[in-house]
């Protein structure tokens, strides 16, 4: 017999935070099986690098990913070892290293593009575009609130 979980006992906000965490974990598990030679987290790093106008530093990329410098550095070292990224010296500040995607990363994108589109369509199947927009707006507001909470926590310490 299946043990069903009722969310009424924890309240909507607690349920939502838990569901976001569980959904993220389940998505990562499915996505890890989708790719052969890199993990979903490594793929996400490659995607985020493309979002910058110029090659990002590790600190810039860490902020975009919402992860620590050390965790991002480990992901980058694995991607460097497998030939997906390279570190280059910043032209203005020789102490900084910037991250660039290699042709292998571009090939990776091309080889997975069609199937990725199929998976994304399946993932969002049956979701009303208006609800999706509202969800995006809600998540953006939650992110802004979290940034305020981080500052408040730093001030308290």
Image (cartoon, rainbow, N blue to C red):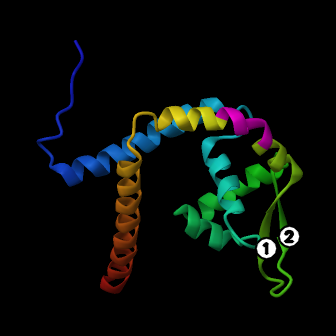
| 62 w.r.t. 107: above or below | below
Point 40% across, 55% down: residue:
133
Q: Position of residue 73 (x, y in %)?
A: 68, 61
The residue that label 2 is drawn on is 88
The residue that label 1 is drawn on is 97
| Viewer-proximal residue among 79 and 34 | 34
The boundaries of the magenta stretch are: 110-115
Q: Position of residue 24 (x, y in %)?
A: 45, 44
**Residue at disc 1, secondary structure:** strand
Q: Position of residue 1 (x, y in %)?
A: 22, 12
Q: Earlier in the sequence, mark 2 or mark 1?
A: 2
Pointer 2 local density, CA inside 10 Å: few below 14, some 14–19, many at least 20: some
**Residue at disc 2, secondary structure:** strand
| 146 w.r.t. 72: above or below | below
**Residue furthest out toward the left:** 9
Pointer 1 local density, CA inside 10 Å: few below 14, some 14–19, many at least 20: some
Left of 45 or right of it: where is 30?
A: left
Q: Quadrant of residue 89?
A: bottom right
Left of 155 or right of it: where is 121?
A: right
Point 72% across, 71% down: residue:
56
């Amino acid at each position: 017999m299946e043990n069903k979980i009722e969310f009424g006992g924890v309240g909507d906000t607690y349920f939502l935070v838990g569901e976001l965490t569980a959904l993220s974990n389940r998505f990562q598990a499915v996505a890890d099986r989708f790719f052969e030679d890199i993990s979903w987290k490594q793929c996400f790093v490659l995607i985020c690098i493309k979002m910058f106008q110029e090659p990002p530093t590790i600190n810039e990329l860490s902020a975009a990913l919402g992860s620590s410098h050390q965790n991002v550095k480990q992901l980058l070292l694995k991607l460097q070892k497998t030939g997906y990224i390279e570190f280059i010296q910043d032209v203005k500040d020789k102490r900084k290293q910037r991250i660039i995607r290699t042709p292998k990363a571009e090939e990776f994108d091309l080889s997975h593009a069609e199937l990725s589109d199929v998976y994304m369509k399946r993932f969002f199947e049956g979701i009303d575009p208006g609800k999706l927009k509202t969800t995006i707006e809600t998540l953006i507001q939650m992110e802004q609130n979290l940034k305020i909470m981080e500052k408040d926590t730093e001030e308290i310490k």
